[in-house]
Structure formats: structure tokens, C-alpha cells
Amino acid sequence: MAVSPLHPAAPVRPPAARLDVEDLSLQFGGVKALDGIELHVEPGSITALIGPNGAGKTSAFNSISGFYKPKTGRVLLDGQDITGVPARDRAKLGLARTFQNIALFRGMTVLDNIKLGRHAHLTTGVFDAFLYWGKARREEMELRAEIERDVIDFLELDHIRNVPVAILPYGLQKKVELARALAMRPRILMLDEPVAGMNREETEDMARAILDVRDEWGVTVLLVEHDMGMVMDISDRVCVLNFGRRIAAGTPAEVRANPDVIKAYLGGSGDPRKGADPAAVSEVA
Amino acid sequence: MAIEFIDIVETSLAGLGTGSLMALTGVAFVIIYKATKVINLAIGEMLMIGAFVFYGFSAGLALPIWASVPATLVVAALIGGVIERTMIRPLLKDNPVSVFMVTIGLTSVLIGVVELVWSAEPRRLPEFLPQQPVLIGDAFIPSKTAYSFLIASAVMAVLITVFAFWRGGIALRATATDRAAASSVGIDVPGVFSFSWMLAATVAALAGILVGSVGGISSAMGLFGLSVFVVVIVGGLDSILGALIAGLFIGWLEAMVGRFLGGEFKLLATFSILLIVLVVRPYGLFGTHEIERL
């Protein structure tokens, strides 16, 4: 794991995790949102989940982070089956996520938002705080120092740390959400459309931040994104969904050349699944 | 001078005494609103059932005071937990108006339970506060009012300190702001819901014991909740400090108006304040700006 010379006291971070999704299916009433999705995310890689609108990207994302209960299939974190683990406990296992529509705690400052990212890892809990006043305080101070150093300075948010998040421009709010996820000391970072609605400059800034996070924190990144340029630039692997099924997976170059993917995006005739055997395509992965 | 200074002082102190109980109940309301965004119209009835449980322990079972107060608070916390688990949590995903309506139903349920067990007859709580009236300078304050004020103030001081410095206080706010985001950072959202209802029920029961020790108890004492709604609307639905200040102010104002203008002007004064606040600062004096309208 790379340790920046700027941060000599950087704590030992938990190693990047591997994520495997096997045969994941999700149903809303009669609608099959996901149909037997396979996804394998290598430790320390940046993997993108792409697909046209309604392809099931966010459904897959929410199933992996524990917000939806899949009908069948398994989610494995470093080989451990976490399919039945509630979202809040997945946070403790090192799975951090951001949301497509910014989900910050409005009315709080940037610093409070980021500090809440560490909630899951503090050893003094809701009730202990009454009993171990001193310990809780000490933890609070250490936490603050660590977050200042590792997250706020790292993402260059120091000038806005005491600003209420609600008044920040969109791009910065997205970055604060990333910061909150980083404060969770994730082993897997899941980003739901990190650059949606951003201009070019903001997009480049965010892409750089994601690459820095991966390189310096050595964390595995799984992202959903519509911005193809950004996805192809920073991803190691790309997985393409359409109509709830995986139609392709591989390196950006492989996926770009895949006829099913082209058809799905440019609108071929009818059901893109008819074009080729999806199993054959997925062998590429 | 027609109005004597001592009269003003005594009336003010008595008003602050009632006000502190409104403030304490207001704090119970705010705890629930802060963490769960539920407007709990049954707060007055939660206060009432607390008072009756205390009556049951102290008069019915004749337990000593040091046993019946803690026992009441424990039972109240359980009642709060059961209400949350059975009536509020199942509606978590529904529209806030449904939850609000459920709390209206809850008032009737709680009144019904109390009347079934203890009948609708008003009762007196056993005397447990010192009887000796308190003198501040020349001002005479009934002992129950004075001790209620002290107890309520102490409890509120603890709650305000805890919510200001304890990290869990922020977790409560986070849960109220965005449940999905809260669980994504590992906050136990259902736990926060249970905790806030149990804590609020406990605080309300304590207020009920104090209100009942001053004025007796009856199944209609939940009406005290009406003044409390004015308090929390004036103070801001999500501000503990606001509930405290507004509670003391409304209590003081009602006492002064009642004493010097006549009892019939009390509610006029209270609701005029409410009207002015709603027009000028609809989110309350200390509340967060973006409170949704129901």
C-alpha cells in the first residue's frame, strides 16, 4: 500500500477487499430488476458498472450495499457471505457507499458529516457514552485529528470544513459524500454516479480524487456511472448491464468493442440478449 | 401603585414553575421529533400514563417513593418502546401524515387504558415532596412548585448537556435527516427510533409525576399537552433549548396574564404568541429552517 510522504503518521489501513456477486436476482412485484448478475471485483481495482437507463445498475448497487434484499444469489466480501447482513453492519465490515442523489446530513457542517462516517467504528456506542465519558472524549479527539489529516487535507476540503453542507455547490457536496465514505476506512468504496451532473472540470477533479483514493488508500472501488469518457479512463474492469442482465464484462477496450454493448447503447433491434449468448461474452471477464 | 412588586415576583416564580414542566414535556416531544421526524400528538397522554403508573406503584402497591419513581420510569420506557415497535415502526416507510394520525389514535388508546384500569375519576398522588413552603426573599412559593422546578431544571440540564456533547446526539440528528445515509455509515436506525421513543416516554412520565403531584391526576390531564404544543411550535420543533426557553416563557406569561388580567385572558395570550410566531418565524424561534409542513 502506498503511503504518501506527506502523511508519515498515516495509520495502517485495512487491506482492500475482494467482492463477488453470484447469480444475483432481484424482483419488484412482477418486474425482474436483476436477473442472475455475476460480478467479480478484484482487490484494489476500479471496476465500473455501466448500462443504459433502467439496466439495473442502481438495483445491483443497492443489493450489494444491503438496501435491497435480493431474491436469489449471494454477495461475498473476501469470500464471506454477507447477503443477509443489514446495511448498517456492512458499513462495519468496510463497505462504504455514496448515493446517486446526494445523501448528506443537511443542516450539519462538512466536518460533522465526515465525522459521522466513523460512527460505525467507534468503540463507544450510544449507551457507553454515558458510562465512559473520558474515553468517548479521547476517541473524539483522535478521530478528529485523523480525519483532518487523512480525509479533509487529502481531498482538499480544509477551506470548507465548517461550512454547512447545504450551501455548497453540487460538485463539492459530492466530494463531501466521498469524504464521508472515506472516513469509514472502507475496504470497498461504492460510488453511485460520482460525477453525474458535473461539468468537465468537476468531473476531472472527481476522477482524479477517485484515482488518488485507490492509489493512496489501496481501496477497492466499485462505481456506477453514465459518463463513458470517465469510466473508460479510470476503470480497470467494466461490467455492462442491460435489462437486468449482464451483457458484457472485461477491460474498457474489450467492452467498447463488444457488439452487444454497442447495440444496447445505440439501440439495436429489439432485445439485445438475442444477439449473442451472454455466457460466451462473459467469458471475456 | 396598584400592583405590588412582591405579587409580581410570586406570580412570576409560580409561572416559571409551571413553565418548567411544560418545558420538560416539550423536551420529550422534541426528542422524538429530532430523531424520527414524528409529530407525536400523544405526548400529553404519555405524560398522563406515566403519572398513573406512578400512582399505581406509590398508592396502589404502596411502594416507597425511592422505589416507585424508578419503577415508573422503567415501565414508561417499556411503554415507549412498545408504542414505537408496534405503532410507529411499521409505518416508517409511509407518509408522515399517517404516522401523525396514528399518534392521534394513540391518545385515545392511552386514555382508554387508564380509564379501564383506574376509572375516569380524578385522584391525588401521595405526598412525597417536602411540605415546607420555600421563601425567596419575601416571596412565598408553594413547595411543590419549587421542587418541581428544581427537578425539571436538573433533568433538562442533563439532557441538554448530553445532546450537545454526546456523539450519539449527532447520530439522532443524522437519522432524522436521512435514514438511508445514516444506515450507510453504520447507524442503527431502528435502534435510534426505539431509543428516542423510550427516552421521550421516560421524560414525559417524569413530567407527569411532577404535574400530578402539583395538581392531581385524571384521565383528562393529557390536555396539558395542548400548551406543550404551543411551547414546541414557539421554540422550534427540533430544538431542545427552544423548548426550554419557550416553556418557561409561556408558563410565566400564562401566570402573569391570569393573575393581572384575569384567567379568561390566559389562552388568548398563549395563542396570540403562537399566532405571531407562526407568522414571523414558522419554524420556531430556535428551530431548523427547513421543517416540512404537514
Image (tube, coloured by chain):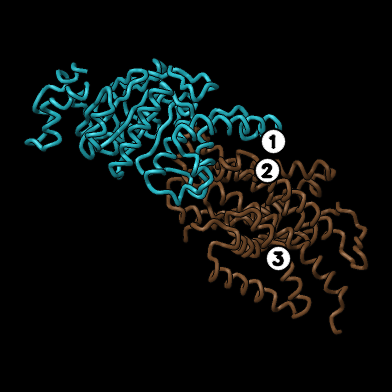
Chain colours: A cyan, B brown
Q: Quadrant of the C terminus of chain A?
A: top left
- The kind of secondary structure element at disc 2 is helix
Q: Report how far apart the C-alphas of labels 2 and 3 lie in the structure.
A: 23 Å
**Mark 2 lies on residue:** B162
What residue is shown at x 14% (from left), y 18% (from top)?
A: A280
The picture quadrant where one finds residue B150 is bottom right
- The kind of secondary structure element at disc 1 is helix
Q: Which residue lies furthest to the bottom in this view?
A: B1
Alpha-carbon neighbours of circle 2 within 10 Å: few (<14), some, or many (≥20)? some
**Mark 1 lies on residue:** A130
For residue B52, side relative to residue B189 (left or right): right
Alpha-carbon neighbours of circle 1 within 10 Å: few (<14), some, or many (≥20)? some
Badge 3 sits on which subunit? B
Badge 1 sits on which subunit? A
Q: Tell me if label 1 and label 2 are in contact, CB under 8 Å.
A: yes
Q: Report how far apart the C-alphas of labels 3 and 1 lie in the structure.
A: 31 Å
Q: Quadrant of the N terminus of chain A?
A: top left
Where in the figure is residue B269, as x and y percent of width and height?
A: 66, 75
| Amino acid type at image mark 3 | Phe
> Is the residue at mark 2 from the same chain as the one at mark 3?
yes
